[in-house]
């Protein structure tokens, strides 16, 4: 028989190792506690698994023909997936195992050899999830391809063997769940004590995760000031990438990673934790980082140096706390005006896309058009085509002219008025402080306290956002605006798109009427209303 092997290396924690590591262990690092990944209780790695399963097959007269490798793969942990019908579900993701099952059904390995069965080291290497086990049983029962292990615990050929396998997998599943619960509880306790946990070095700190990396910390402070003054996270990301400054893992920055580090309470010295929010309407799962509070409602201070003051960080969160605002310039488009231009024919309104000019048009290299998608695509009417480079020039001039007009308008404001909701915010913050004092004195219940705090915090964030926007407008009235016309050609595409999206909601492109009509006359800009 031709037998293939399945080798899985897992980073699920061994329960015995977890118990042994429940007290501090000297790991040679700043934070003591560590957990050791397991690859099976009595094996250590890929080579040993391959050696043992090969010897088992060949000792019984079989031919070992192929190895399916699953590096760093959990047989228990579920991840969010979208099923073919669009429904959201949580499943153990094992693409290599699923491919092995498909090969068994067809009787051919990826390199074209005949395959008669599959062997694993033990049942834990095959699965800890009942869905995967039932898939394996289907292969054995209906396609007559045996799946065995070298320990003799896996028998899917008989009813009794399948029953025992289901019991063993259910037991292994519970062990993994228990271990995960203990790890989660330990991490929560460490967060509540203000200690750091595992993971890569956070940007702004040294390898000990406590002391500041001063050059990185200063970059974060500068980025924070730019955001408070109206800058875009995506523009900052483009600038950092352009200067060669990378993440601690050596990756490029994106606007989303900039938002993440600036919203993280760690930068102001607060202990923090990750949280997931599932939207049942959209099926989206959004992860965020939130402050860890003590029972009195006060933020727990972490045992590391802070980069920003808490008040500055709260102002940042007030700006970045919601979805990306218009003007972020965060898309990956390659053309300046895509996403902004709209078809103005027959109430179509479809966004125009860029397309390169065909060779028969005899245009210069790189020439392109903005066109409305065809009717057959179901996304447009196909009735609009406009010169791409000339349109980009016109859009540039529209944005610069509007920016200069707004700069003149801001300079005309001689004396900014006091923010109208200052007293409302002060009263709300006094109420929050009073409730915290009452909770510390145990005069109100925990339930009543957190119900009030949840509503009050949301209202405080809304007021802070409004105040920051007001301050940004009044600051702009007295500061010298940049000369956008002078610096435009030196900006990256992301930065240019940021200015376009901050200025315009859309540009409607009319049909061409007569030859020689200037591109500018076909464009109707729809400007964003400034606050």
Image: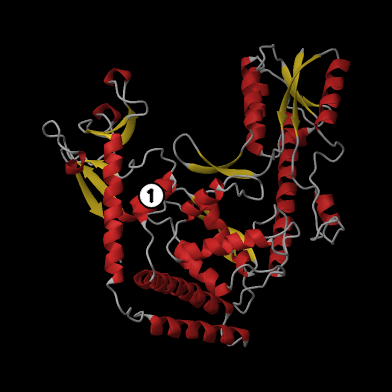
Q: What residue is shown at x 69% (from left), y 40% (from top)?
A: 74
Height in image: 358 above or below 394? above
Q: What residue is shown at x 70% (from left), y 50% (from top)?
A: 177
Residue 132 in the image, given as x and y percentages of width and height: 65, 34
Residue 504 in the image, given as x and y percentages of width and height: 29, 52
Quadrant location of the C terminus? bottom left
Residue at the limit of the structure toward the left, as seen here:
514
Height in image: 375 above or below 142? below
**Left or right side of 344 for 103:** right
Residue 315 in the image, given as x and y percentages of width and height: 49, 70
The answer to whether any part of residue 521 appears in the image is yes
Colouring method of the image: secondary structure
Q: Which residue does the numbered mark 1 point to in the structure image?
A: 488
Tell me which corner region of the image, top left, top right, bottom left or bottom right, holds residue 209: bottom right
Q: What residue is shown at x 83% (from left), y 56% (from top)?
A: 19
**Left or right side of 231 for 194:** right
**Left or right side of 96 for 27:** right
Please name whichever residue, 228 or 92, is drawn nearer the observer in this view of the structure.
228
Q: Secondary structure at mark 1?
A: helix
């Amino acid at each position: 028989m031709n037998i293939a092997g399945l080798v899985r290396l897992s980073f699920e924690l061994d329960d015995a190792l977890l118990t042994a590591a429940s007290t501090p262990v000297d790991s040679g690092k700043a934070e003591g506690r560590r957990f050791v990944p397991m690859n099976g209780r009595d094996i250590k790695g890929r080579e040993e698994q391959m050696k043992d399963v090969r010897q088992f097959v060949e000792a019984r007269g079989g031919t070992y023909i192929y190895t399916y490798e699953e590096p760093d793969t959990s047989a228990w942990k579920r991840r969010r997936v979208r099923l073919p019908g669009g429904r959201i579900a949580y499943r153990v993701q094992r693409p290599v195992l699923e491919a092995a099952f498909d090969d068994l059904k067809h009787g051919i390995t990826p390199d074209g050899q005949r395959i008669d069965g599959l062997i694993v080291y033990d049942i834990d290497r095959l699965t800890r999830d009942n869905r995967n086990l039932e898939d394996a049983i289907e292969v054995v029962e209906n396609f007559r391809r045996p799946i065995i292990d070298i320990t003799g615990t896996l028998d899917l050929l008989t009813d009794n063997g399948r029953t025992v396998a289901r019991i063993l997998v259910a037991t292994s599943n519970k062990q993994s769940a228990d271990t995960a619960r203990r790890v989660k509880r330990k991490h929560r306790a460490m967060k509540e004590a203000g200690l750091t946990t595992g993971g890569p070095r956070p940007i702004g700190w040294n390898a000990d995760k406590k002391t500041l990396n001063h050059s990185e910390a200063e970059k974060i402070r500068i980025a924070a000031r730019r955001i408070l003054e109206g800058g875009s996270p995506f523009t900052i990301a483009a600038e950092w990438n352009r200067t060669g400054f990378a993440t601690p893992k050596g990756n490029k920055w994106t606007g989303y990673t900039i938002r993440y580090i600036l919203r993280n309470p760690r930068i102001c010295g607060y202990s923090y934790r990750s949280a997931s929010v599932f939207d049942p309407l959209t099926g989206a799962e959004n992860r965020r980082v939130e402050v860890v509070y003590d029972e009195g409602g006060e933020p727990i201070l972490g045992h590391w140096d802070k980069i920003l003051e808490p008040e500055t960080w709260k102002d940042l969160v007030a700006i970045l706390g919601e979805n990306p605002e218009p003007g972020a310039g965060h898309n990956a488009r390659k053309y300046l005006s895509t996403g902004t231009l709209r078809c103005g024919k027959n109430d179509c309104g479809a966004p125009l896309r860029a397309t390169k000019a065909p060779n028969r048009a005899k245009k210069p290299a790189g020439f392109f058009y903005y066109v409305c998608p065809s009717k057959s695509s179901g996304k447009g009417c196909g009735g609009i085509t406009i010169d791409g480079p000339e349109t980009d020039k016109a859009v540039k001039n529209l944005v610069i002219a509007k920016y200069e007009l707004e700069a003149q308008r801001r300079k005309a404001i001689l004396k900014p008025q006091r923010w109208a909701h200052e007293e409302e915010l002060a009263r709300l913050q006094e109420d929050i402080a009073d409730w915290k004092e009452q909770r510390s004195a145990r005069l109100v219940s925990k339930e009543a306290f957190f119900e009030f705090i949840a509503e009050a915090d949301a209202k405080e964030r809304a007021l802070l956002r409004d105040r920051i926007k007001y301050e940004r407008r009044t600051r702009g009235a007295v500061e010298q605006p940049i000369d956008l016309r002078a610096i435009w050609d030196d900006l990256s595409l992301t930065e240019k798109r940021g200015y376009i999206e901050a200025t315009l909601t859309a540009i409607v492109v009319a049909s061409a009427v007569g030859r020689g009509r200037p591109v500018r006359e076909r464009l109707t800009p729809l400007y964003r209303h400034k606050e």
